[in-house]
Image: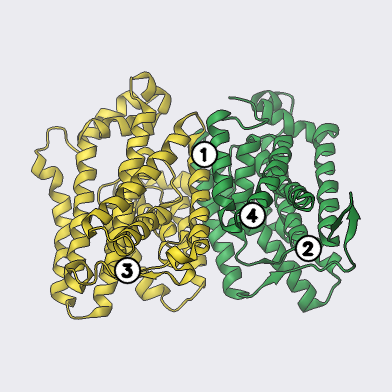
Amino acid sequence: MTTTTTAPVELDATLGGSVPPWRAYLPVLLAALPLALLPLLFGDSRTYMGLATGLLVAAGYAAGFNVIFGMTGQLFLSIGALGGVGGYACAILADRIGLPVVAAILAGTLLASALGALFSWVSVRRSLDVIFTGIVTLTFSLGFENLLLGQRELTGGEDGMRVEAGQDLFIGELVPGYYAILVALIGFLVLFRFLERSHYGWAFRALKDDETTAELAGVDVARYRIHAGAIGSAMVGLTGALYALNEGRVTPTAFEFAGVDVSSLVILAFGGLGTLLAPVIGATFFALLEEFVLRDLGTLRIAVYGLILTALFLFFRDGITGLVGRLRGRNDHLGPNRPV
Amino acid sequence: MGAVLLDGIVGGLQLGLLAMGLSLLYGLGGILNLAHGAVAVTAAIVASLVVDGVGYPIGVAAVIGVGAAALLTLAMDRTVMQAVYKQEGEHRVLLSLLLSLGVAFLVDGLLEWRYPSGALSIRIGGGPVDVFGIGMRRGSLYAAAIALVALGGMIFFLRRTTLGRAVRSIIEDEQGARLVGIDPARVRTLIFVVSGALAGLVAMTNSMSAPVDVRSGFAFTINALIVTVVGGLGSASGALLAGLLLGIVNVLSAFYIGAYVTSIILLTAAAVTILVKPSGLLGRSR
């Protein structure tokens, strides 16, 4: 086992146990700065602001997925559905029941978080959890989609429903809404780095490396996985709720598996699974790809996503960051990953 | 009630068949194929194209469709899955999930783009047939008969033929199988192709009662996965038993509550099984 020798080295190299806190959080600031300046350039263009907001929302989903999948290796195939839980719950609670907007956002976030924790809990009960996580969450995606279509009076079926609650508030406006989602995204990234630097980060790396060794070293693998599931799902649910309020409308298509889950996977695979800035780097790549390459392809887009997903996981498993590192360093690493 | 139950059994036989290939493949290679539904849909679309475009009779078209499904899985095994086989344990499962998901989107997306309204629906003429005093549609009876024959064939193959025994011996103990001269990689390829053909066959039998269209893949995959988990990963007879059980649960919940909750109820069934008996109904605990 190489675990004992590599883990401390990696810790020092990537995070720096001795690195002062301000330097550990510097990358978040550097990534947030250009995003914060975007409205100064495109503030009056509905199209460009819509694109930029879409980028932030995609990055928000990916940030949650990065905690669940990137940090603890749980393949949740229900990111879209969990975002939908946040979005629809927030919309229904605020509009139909009349809850204050903040309470509705909180409730949607907590509901998604509880579901995520439940999925993790079901799956980590025994070994083989990679499969169970995938199957349980994938089934939930289908179940949630059917529920939205079936409960027509509550959800508006396939046409979706209008969300009035955010329309008189700043979240419903173009530029202020963008900043609200950006603040949430920065919060996610800060939380991600905070987790990495805490005992969570230590446990996550240990259990991702080798579960049995981690268990033997005294890491409560089940507990840490469930916590990761809850924290990541909360991020996804919150993103869904903010999206719903900003967009003023929720539809099944906005949260569909073929949209959100595939984009989250592509974003993380491109940006480097489990790395701090993967959601932002990947989402930027994805937004540019969508706008300049895939816009006029119609349903062929789904096929292209499939191709990208397959290619990314076949050839660049550590994302673009890893590829750059590999090209700079040892080229022989490319050898074994070539197709046969 | 009786009619609903019979419908459930007919559906359950097909579910069992759909899950059997997936389950064996997991037992053999430690891989899960999320493109299973996409393979089934490919068979359906190819068959419908052969009928409408070329004008062959439906029987021939169905055989060609099943053959196309088998070819697609062979291609998967020879290309993307090779990277999966190089991995071990949990990484192998994970990579197989990710890559087969990519393939599923690629295949589904191409089909939906090229044949947006593509669908297969095999109509079996003639009135209802009396079974235990219940009028059954002929299409359902044909589907049940075909599923039963295929299931019987699979069970015979696994229990009575040398190759089938080789499959079971690898599931039992891969190292031991290697020692007695069995090549796990070749057997895995064979089972991959068989699972594809079975998925194609289920697309044919399903289309005898309701059309199978380009968007059916997702539901096919998920149903097969649930049945696989409930029956026990790697167990062929478990897949059949779970298929029958869930087929009946499926029609009962659709009949009494509404079709839209069936997947939630199936999900609950799968979750409860995982919690109570993690290895599934007939699966071996590891």
The 10 Å Cα crowd at callout 2, few under 14, some 14 to 19, many 20 or more, is: many
Give the amino acid type for the residue marked by disc 4 in the picture: Ala
Residue placed most toward the observer, B276 or A297: B276
Give the amino acid type for the residue marked by disc 2 in the picture: Met
Closer to viewer: mark 4 or mark 2: 4
Measured Cα–Cα span from mark 3 to mark 2? 42 Å
Give the amino acid type for the residue marked by disc 3 in the picture: Val
Mark 3 = which residue? A163
Report whether mark 4 lies on the same chain as mark 2.
Answer: yes
Is B67 left, or right, of B32 in this rendering?
Answer: right
Measured Cα–Cα span from mark 4 to mark 3? 31 Å
Measured Cα–Cα span from mark 3 to mark 1? 35 Å
Q: Point out the image quarter for the C terminus of chain B.
A: top right
Which numbered tag is attached to residue A132? 1
Which numbered tag is attached to residue B254? 4
What residue sits 29% from the left and 46% below the top?
A275
Q: Quadrant of residue B213?
A: bottom right
Classify mark 3: helix, strand or loop: loop
The 10 Å Cα crowd at callout 4, few under 14, some 14 to 19, many 20 or more, is: some
Residue placed most toward the observer, A19 or B133: B133
Closer to viewer: mark 2 or mark 1: 2
